[in-house]
Amino acid sequence: MDAIPAAPLRSRRTDVFRMLWRSSRDAKDTTARLAASNQTSASAPTGPAASTVKLHVRGISKAYGEATVLGPIELKVVAGELLAVLGPSGSGKTTLLQIICGLVEPSGGQLIIDGRDETDNSADKRDIGVVFQNYALFPHLTVRENVAFPLQMRRVPAAEIKSRAEATLAMVGLSDFANRFPRELSGGQQQRVALARCFVYRPSLILMDESLSALDKKLREDMRIEIKRLHRETGATIIFVTHDQEEALALADRICLMNEGRIEQLGTPQDLYERPANTFVADFIGASNLIHGSIAANGRLETRDGVLPLPDGCDLQLGRPAALVVRPEKLVLCGADEALLSGRVQESIYAGSETRLLVRLASGTAITVRRTAGLPPVEIDDNVFIRWERDQARVLDSSPSTSGA
Ligand SMILES: Nc1ncnc2c1ncn2[C@@H]1O[C@H](COP(=O)(O)OP(=O)(O)O)[C@@H](O)[C@H]1O
Ligand SMILES: [Mg+2]
């Protein structure tokens, strides 16, 4: 928690900031940015101006010696979009980000920013702001001086530095902390200074690498809201790296889910949650139950826990290894006569508005069932029966070449 709570953001402060931000842009760019920043919904920007491609990662790859750690990656980021790059540790997220900002040279491919090939341009020539996980503030400079620093580097006139630094500090709710040193701030406040120091010079593309991971849960959630707001108010294109799927679902217009240097799926949070492309995605995004088996005749999946009905439209070949994916909220406890599965309650986890039951099937597969409050209690070791609507499950090919494993 904040030792000294920072003032919440207020929209009137940001009007000034928005004006300053836009004044530095050329007319064409401003038009696109206006269109993008007028987007108030969390969905990916639409419309002709907003659909401009800001960044095109064209077949980018990276190898260290014999080991290929990335790609080739193909990715288009739309101007004004907030894209989360999500994936387990070691999946290549930081490598991709460092190639985009110019700190790491790619082994192959091109990097197109605003339609220009920037592959061979050095980091300082790219109009990109980066916010690191560890804040990287200058300890001997005050908050105001830290925020002013990027403008001094760019030889902005003194009067303008002053007004822009003040406006940006106001935007992140730190006006009253301008004369403090970083060591006199809480973690959340230091993170806001790092954000302000990036936003102050109005980069049109902002990269954040696990920028919130060092914060505790409550602060992290507050910062998510602030980043979303900063994004909406400035219209900047933001690429946000995280290993936390909850963070990606909460923040992003689209998620780029990576695994072992490849993109497993690129889509809206709803796409990845409701229409996972493979079992890796289904397993990584949200809580999900995966029941493995093989495709049997008449639209069924043969599993070690019985033969289960498949949703309509399954076009997998007979005998093919497949997994049925059912989200915990789609499962209901029922009587033995309607049951598709049965198992023993192994754990019951109370979470206020709901109770999560961990049910162990005869095969050993664990299934999570969500029960809303108010239903009759279930005891550990009780035998329970489970059903779901056939079309609320998804079936995914789980042969090794497609599972992402
Ligand atoms: N300088 C390097 N030399 C050799 N291997 C590296 C280097 N940097 C990263 N890697 C490897 O590349 C892979 C991806 O790393 P990274 O991009 O940091 O993953 P992430 O950010 O998703 O955790 C890892 O296996 C890592 O060990
Ligand atoms: Mg990383």
Image: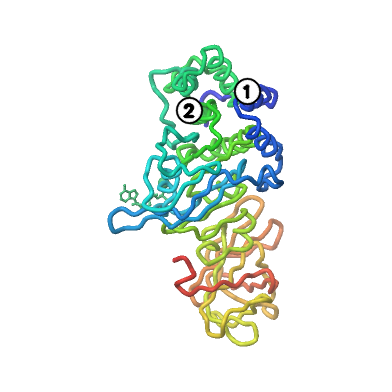
Mark 2: secondary structure: helix
| Residue at left offset 52%, top offset 14% | 157
The C terminus, quarter of image? bottom left
Image coordinates of residue 383 in percent, x first then y, are 59, 73
| Residue at left offset 68%, top offset 24% | 15
Viewer-closest of 389 and 256: 256
- State which quadrant residue 271 falls in: bottom right
Q: Residues within 10 Å of mark 2 (few under 14, many from 20)?
A: many
Viewer-closest of 369 and 288: 288
Instruction: Give the amino acid at mark 2.
Output: Gln
Image coordinates of residue 170 in percent, x first then y, are 60, 21
The residue beneath circle 2 is 190
- State which quadrant residue 231 falls in: top right
Ligand 2 is within 8 Å of the C-beta of the residue at disc 1 = no
Mark 1: secondary structure: helix
Q: Residues within 10 Å of mark 1 (few under 14, many from 20)?
A: some
Instruction: Give the amino acid at mark 1.
Output: Leu
| Residue at left offset 41%, top offset 59% | 260
Give the total number of marks visible in the rendering.
2
Most extreme residue toward the bottom is: 297
Whether the residues at callouts 2 and 1 have beta carbons within 8 Å, the answer is no
Q: Is residue 245 left or right of residue 45?
A: left
Image coordinates of residue 273 in percent, x first then y, are 61, 59
Viewer-closest of 212 and 401: 401
Above or below 58: residue 315: below
Q: Between marks 2 and 1, how big is the CA–CA gap?
A: 23 Å
Image coordinates of residue 80 in percent, x first then y, are 62, 41
Q: Is residue 32 left or right of residue 361?
A: right
Color encoding of the figure: rainbow
Q: Is residue 228 left or right of residue 41?
A: left
Task: Please tell me the numbered disc located at residue 20.
Answer: 1
- In primary-sequence order, the first of circles 2 and 1 is 1
